[in-house]
Amino acid sequence: MRGIGFTVLAALALAGCNMGPKEPELATEGVTDAMLAAGNGEEWLTYGGDYDEQRFSPLNQITDANVGELGLAWSADLDTARGQEATPLMHDGTLYISTAWSMVKAYDARTGALKWAYDPEVPRSKLVEVCCDAVNRGVALYGDKVYVATLDGRLVALDQKTGKVAWSKLTIPEGSHMAITGAPRIVKGRVLIGSAGSEYFTRGYLAAFDAQTGEELWRFYTVPGDPSKPQEGKHLEAAAKTWSGDFWKLGGGGTVWDSITYDPKTDLVYFGTANAEPWNPAYRNTDGAGDSLYTASIVAVKPDTGEYAWHFQETPEDRWDFDSNQQITVTDLNIGGQSRRVVMHAPKNGFFYVLDAATGKFISGKPFVDGINWASGLDPVTGKPDVNPEAKYELTGKPFVSVPGAVGAHSWTPMSFSATTGLVYIPTNNTPQYYAHDPDWEPGTTGFQLGVDFTGGNIPADKGVRDATKAVLNGALVAFDPVAGEVRWKVPQSSPTNGGTLATAGNLVFQGTSTGEFRAYAADTGKQLWSFATQTGVLAAPMTYAIDGEQYVAVVVGWGGVWDVSAGKLGGGITPNISRLLVFKLGATGSLPPVKPTPALVLDPPAPAGTPEQIALGEKLYSNSCSVCHGISAVAGSLNPDLRHSATLGQKDLWQKVVHDGLLAENGMVAWKGQFSREQIEAIRTYVLKRANEDKALEGK
């Protein structure tokens, strides 16, 4: 009997090994699953406000009639001078935010008193593996814990009351070029998080971790691996047929760096995926064209197991960096006289998609911006784009200026949806982008790995050309009707990459701008009703909460992100970085301290050097690698050093020690010796010297 009992127990144990991921323990106190689903308005418990990610609040103390009485209740200065992109969360009288470099702070939501702060001490050298600044978009709450995903790939659970670390888990592969900038989401006791890095030879995924222990429960890969080995699921076996050549050696991309949405009604998790890696299909589909699944797609999986449910690819064989990581919103719409559960999406490519939430079936797709030229439209049945042949720059061998560009018609900045007006409020961009096939590209080790040559997109030292360029780079707040597929109203904005939006039952839409305002608009008409000078650009989306019968509106401000680091001052919309948390309520009369003047940098470069051939090589290398951080045409933004002013510019040996050897690695400037030879690094210096002297001459005119 003893032997039989042992056999039975062993069999049961083995059976348990095949039962899939274990069921995590659900929170019964603190923030529970029921609370996350309810979204009652008084508290803001998850990134998008509730599971549907509508960013709509039922609070209506602040309305279109009295919003003019809104004033600053309190503010808190933040101890980091990088871009701020987080949405605050509020629970039990405490406001939780994350900041750049993945730091977390907890404030008294009434008074602004700091309760605790946590710094994960992310190495500054990680910055070279992040496309778009050292940002973080927010934390998650569950039970008695706060969860933050750090730039260097850790998922950390903190005690809500003290900020003490409960557990920490490395979620990206050891030694990976991946980073994390997104906010975690909580689903049935699981913490869901992906990663960023589809420019750095990475393989995308979404993973689930036990909220109590940090144990990994499942991992869903978004692109196939080595085709000579078994794939991790039938969905990857199907996807492998849409790639060719040795694509897997370059990672594939498809990272899940932002959008994650759970719908209890369908019991599905929807997430967006990033571009394929490299951008240029010539280097990842070497044996012929392919859609490169599941990049630039919306994918649905079952939350308990991570099992594939459906997908819809919005940009097949993406070659323009048209990520689909933008916020995914779930709702019920009346379509053709019937109520349908749908997901709504406004990705980078400029078309607004409405899909069936249960099946992923295409319902509609209409432009939400003007001037789209990479595709003439979408197939009305399948939703597949009719791609302009000229947009396939790797096939034509000719440059293509795409509208939209890589920043996207809609970037990561969150949209909101009001069931009251039936409108979606989208922060949109008009940022054309130059693309050209690079026939000389070879895989490297450091920085972007794209296979695209951006040299022809540089802006010369000509005032007329620069003014004209700035004039066409702008944005707008768009109110879009998802049923009719039409723009109902639009507020033009002088610069792109403005902040995310919040819609409320008070017939209001709140949004910050890149030029330093926090505004309130009438949700039905778009009329501006109120504005507050933030002294810095706003990227993050606001939220609202109520305590003791008073409604508050909170937003994190602080300029940075992709537009500052890559477009630089030539892209316009540059403001100083003054990182703060601002909280408003009716009747408050608070004010901000005066802005400290920033000393103007004077261009005084050494004399030009180098041969024309050397300078031309340096321009190409700078354009395709260095411009990502130091600005197009060597004109930086407000965050990263402007190399035209560098003290190393006239010192060849010191320039080599910094760029080749990594002398300033602890400040974020790592060694590039694996990517460039000393001769190539010297060529970059000669190009920057040329640019500095050209701009000095322009200033004298």
Image: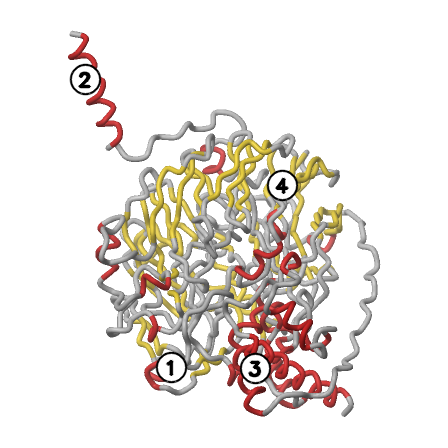
Q: Does the CB distance between marks 2 and 4 fall below 8 Å? A: no
Where does label 2 land, which residue? 8
Residue drawn at (75%, 51%), measured in percent from left and top? 71
Residue drawn at (45%, 64%), measured in percent from left and top? 199
Assign a secondary structure to mark 4: strand
Could you tell me the amino acid type at mark 4?
Tyr
Could you tell me the amino acid type at mark 1?
Tyr
Q: CA distance from mark 2 to mark 3?
A: 71 Å
Q: CA distance from mark 1 to mark 4?
A: 45 Å
Assign a secondary structure to mark 2: helix
Along the viewing direction, whichever of 628 and 402 lies nearer the viewer: 628
Q: Is residue 114 above or below residue 331?
A: above
Q: CA distance from mark 3 to mark 1?
A: 23 Å
Would you identify the image quadrant in which residue 224 lies? bottom left
Earlier residue among tags 2 and 3:
2
Left or right of 222 on screen, residue 611: right
Could you tell me the amino acid type at mark 2?
Val
Q: CA distance from mark 2 to mark 4?
A: 50 Å
